[in-house]
Image (cartoon, rainbow, N blue to C red):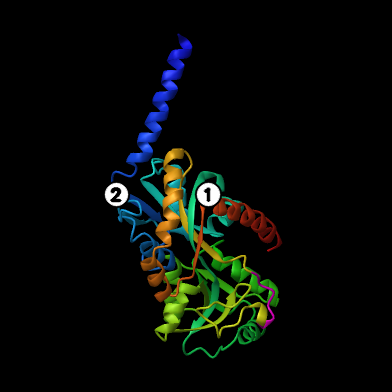
Amino acid sequence: MKNLIAGAAMALMGLAGTAMAEEYPDRPIMMMVSYGAGGATDFQARIVTMTAGNEDALGMPIAIINKPGAGGRVGWNWFATQADADGYTLAAYNVPHFIAQSIKGGVSYSADSFEPIANWGADPAVFVVGADSPFNSMADVVAHAKENPGKLTFSGAGLFVGHHIAALQIEKAAGVKMAYIPTKGGGAAAMKAVIAGEVMGGINNLSDAFRAQEAGNVKILGVADLQRSDFLPNVPTMQEQGLDVDNSSVNFRGVMVPKGTPQEVIDELAATVPEMFANPRVAKKMQAGGSPMHIMTRDEVKAMWAAREQTLKELLAGL
């Protein structure tokens, strides 16, 4: 009798799980972005989710909610400790940002706090200066930094984000000390500081910098990646300019859910979201905005997270 009851219970649980997967989602979904409106993560998140309501996607819209502060820490702390694990609260992730922050400590999250769903882009860090700056290459920047130790000011989106990691790598590679200034408000605020002349330069996302250069507001002097970007074919990499800076600061962006989200929901999202990212309308808008796409599945993202964590532990110890 007990076996019959247990079997019936297992069958009911299976039916409930199937029903949940079939019904999900049955209402709009929220996605938290831990950076301010107008920055690269926010800009791209709104593009890659714009077809979420289509019948061939999730069939429900995704609303973007911004929780900026402390280089992403405010939003990710909230997501790890307070967000509902029901599939209706998603978040955009930024790697290396949240992994580097968890390695350095002082936050309530690690890679184990979240479940990745899919990756939509890979955005390299670039060094930018104002359009009227006398600097025209990384050699100019390094020469000035050597002549004026600690006085070359440059902005970035926060501490232990991709911008900061690129900054530390540049300083180490060039053997110089500069004044990195983390700004409140993410990449958009960091770019405004460069354009307004509040700093002498900045590290920013290629996508933000591409739009600013197209508007005639900045010059892009170098890319922190292993090869030139198709968006900036005339801008050399840091390595091409003699600086030993690799791709550790490249900003991978994607979607994740809190640990504890039902597996049926994770599976549904993991099957649907990469196809949503691959929508031609999404690709066209990302291309127009200078936003590099790099679509990865859940399993590919899990492998990327693990590899980046190992790399960052070694890199941050050295820096």
Q: CA distance from mark 2 to mark 1?
A: 29 Å
Label 1 sits on what residue type? Val
Can the viewer see residue 78 in this picture? no
* Total marks placed: 2
Left or right: residue 138 versus residue 202 is: right
Residue on which the image places disc 2: 28
Image coords of residue 227 (percent x, y): 61, 75
Element type at marker 1?
Answer: loop
Can the viewer see residue 165 in this picture? yes
Image coords of residue 317 (percent x, y): 69, 58
Sequence-first tag of 2 and 1: 2
Please give the label number shown on residue 157.
none
- Which residue corresponds to the image point at 42% horizontal and 78% vertical from the top-left? 211
Q: Where does the magenta region start and end?
A: 241-246
Q: Is residue 166 above or below residue 32?
A: below
Residue on which the image places disc 1: 107
Main secondary structure type of the part rendered in magenta: loop
Label 2 sits on what residue type? Pro
Q: Nearer the viewer, residue 47 or 66?
A: 47
Q: Nearer the viewer, residue 261 or 53?
A: 53
Q: Nearer the viewer, residue 307 or 8?
A: 8
Q: Mark 2 packing: few (<14 Cα in 10 Å), some, or many (20+)?
A: some
